[in-house]
Image (spheres, coloured by chain):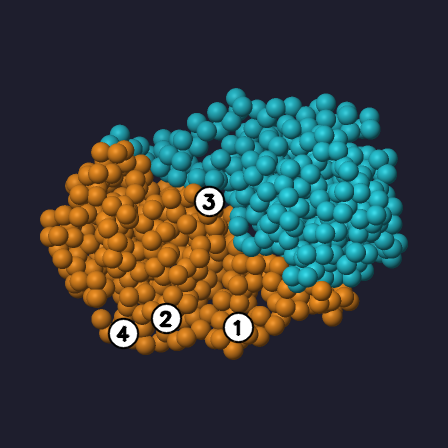
Chain colours: A orange, B cyan
Amino acid sequence: MDKIRQTIRKITEIDAKLMIKAQSRLDNLTKPLGSLGRLEEIAKQVVGIMGKEKIVFKNKVIFTLAADHGVTEERISAYPKEVTSQMVYNFLNGGAGINVLARHVGARVVVVDMGVSSELKAQSENLKVKKIALGTQNFAKGPAMTREEAIKSIETGIEIVEEEIVNGLDIVGTGEMGIGNTSSSSAITALFTKTEVSEVVGRGTGLDDAGLENKIQVIERALRINKPDPKDPLDVLSKVGGFEIGGLAGIILAASSRRIPVVIDGFISGAAALIAYQLEPKTKEYMLASHCSVEKGHKVILNYLGLDPILDLNLRLGEGTGAALGINIVEAAIKILNEMATFKKAGVSESNPR
Amino acid sequence: MDKIRQTIRKITEIDAKLMIKAQSRLDNLTKPLGSLGRLEEIAKQVVGIMGKEKIVFKNKVIFTLAADHGVTEERISAYPKEVTSQMVYNFLNGGAGINVLARHVGARVVVVDMGVSSELKAQSENLKVKKIALGTQNFAKGPAMTREEAIKSIETGIEIVEEEIVNGLDIVGTGEMGIGNTSSSSAITALFTKTEVSEVVGRGTGLDDAGLENKIQVIERALRINKPDPKDPLDVLSKVGGFEIGGLAGIILAASSRRIPVVIDGFISGAAALIAYQLEPKTKEYMLASHCSVEKGHKVILNYLGLDPILDLNLRLGEGTGAALGINIVEAAIKILNEMATFKKAGVSESNPR
């Protein structure tokens, strides 16, 4: 718990003064005032986050955290839970969606086993094994994990960032893999945003109507049985969370404490963002929402946090795929700020008030 | 006119059979069915356009066409018309928004002088001088150009693509620069989509309320005086168009005839797309709308053409900036199709109907 407290203590407001300076530079670039819309806002926010004006994203890293969920016993997913570990191998072999998109945007993918239910037979410099346990317990019958495990999952997220900073880390993308984790995210979202379960549950990887109805009932039962306290984020994480979700919350806290921008992926990453935000509201200023997921609970999270998604491409894959594309737009925004000529330098006439 | 007719004759339907094959490959990739949303749709469309499955975008080209507009006499822009040529120099020096974003996505920018009102003192391998005239006439007083000039501007666009194919051309982005050209685009949009002028006129580079009111009146007057015939796209182009708009319409026709995907930028590119579409409706299948501009007429165009914009970043700069970012997403989509592993290859279990 000390590690979490120390990290939170280091999270400061973002630099409002430098943001004003960035705005003034943006206003002098050879384009009509404000005509690059969101790109300008993003550039300004990132300057505020990093506390410097000359920014180069040399090391773009997507953290894809994998873990299993005991609640899969309740048949809440269209896929068997073995897929979690099978997909980890796919990540390490470079064949998954996140690998393709990370290569496309020049990011590296760091895969972390936060609690896959089998021992992985893989050694790779891209894999960190940080197992908290062999999957969570079935939260439809009791807590998903102990409070100690919840703390450890967040602390592990912090550790992962600290380790990766040694290799270079200028911008973070969040990602995950875990069959069953939209159920966990729905429960977390319903609790913190005080929304009906049925309003935050989607089809995940592809449930039919009966499957969706069952999923809603399982989550409602889980909340009745566990009674998580929404004022205590660690209680929520331990009762209905997941190890990858705790890990991502830790990554968000650590990145914020190091003034590194965090590009949040979709629904599950959003649930982790809710936990980080409950632990320290200032983390919100360090977040950029990459996209709006098809999973309907995600919009509830974005509204609650007041985050405006950069992209809306009807994605619902997770893994960090939306974050990868979002990072690319954030990088474009920073290049606009850095590389465009000013009116003066380019000898272009400015506008006449008209 | 022969050149336009010949080009149109070569435009065929896109390949529906190959699109079904692409869908089947997408369905076998290691992700839940349809979970990459728009990326999957885009990949499928591009396969249909190019008529092949293995696609690599080695040569991404943004055509930024510049021309002046006589209607600037009517004070319809917040910027003096000299900015058109000044910005061409900025493009050639690499300091404009389009240069930054094209570099970011690995595209080259081909700048074309379609009718800047001064003789440019620049020689660059990135500049094509294809002047139709030293700017259009003031269309608030009579036709912007002759019918012959309208034909020549479209034919020049076709020529530009033919010339550039020699250097390699796998995907096209449209872009433009021309102080006054949102006025021309508003007139074109109002005519083809049968919409009130006031519903398709925006603030362009930054008009105040009085400037906006004046702009609406100028365009209404232009339509009254010129009476362009919306059933005759060449009449519309000659009466209220611009040389860069005609050029872009030619580029869209030529790219479609060569089965090259065309990523359409914002409002002015959209007006050019309307002209291309009126000349040959099949061009629509070759278009991808990169983004939705802040200029309100753009949404009217997108609705009319039934194009769903890829991005919505509140851009209104033009130059091809939205197209550059759009090309990047299209490339990501194609890489998903080409590079992701199938369930079988990766040894990942498929979903159970549930």
Give the quarter of the figure containing the N terminus of chain B.
Answer: top right
Q: Do labels 3 and 1 touch, CB within 8 Å?
A: no
| Disc 3: host chain | A
Crowd rating for badge 4 (residues with CA inside 10 Å; few <14, some 14–19, many 20+): few
Instruction: Specify which label sits upstream in the sequence, 3 or 1.
Output: 1
**Of residues A267 and B208, which is closer to you in this image?**
B208
Q: Which mark is residue A303?
A: none
Relative to residue B14, is residue B233 drawn left or right? Answer: right
Residues under labels 4 and 3: Cα distance? 37 Å
Give the quarter of the figure containing the C terminus of chain B.
Answer: top left
**Of residues A187 and A94, which is closer to you in this image?**
A187
Q: Do labels 2 and 3 touch, CB within 8 Å?
A: no
The answer to whether residue B248 is above or below residue B135 is above
Q: Secondary structure at mark 3?
A: loop
Residue plotted at (33% across, 69% down): A281
Crowd rating for badge 3 (residues with CA inside 10 Å; few <14, some 14–19, many 20+): many
Q: Nearer the viewer, mark 4 or mark 1?
A: 1
Residues under labels 4 and 1: Cα distance? 28 Å
- Look at label 3 and name its amino acid: Leu
Q: Which residue is mark 2?
A: A282
Q: Which residue is mark 4?
A: A5
Q: Which residue is mark 3?
A: A313
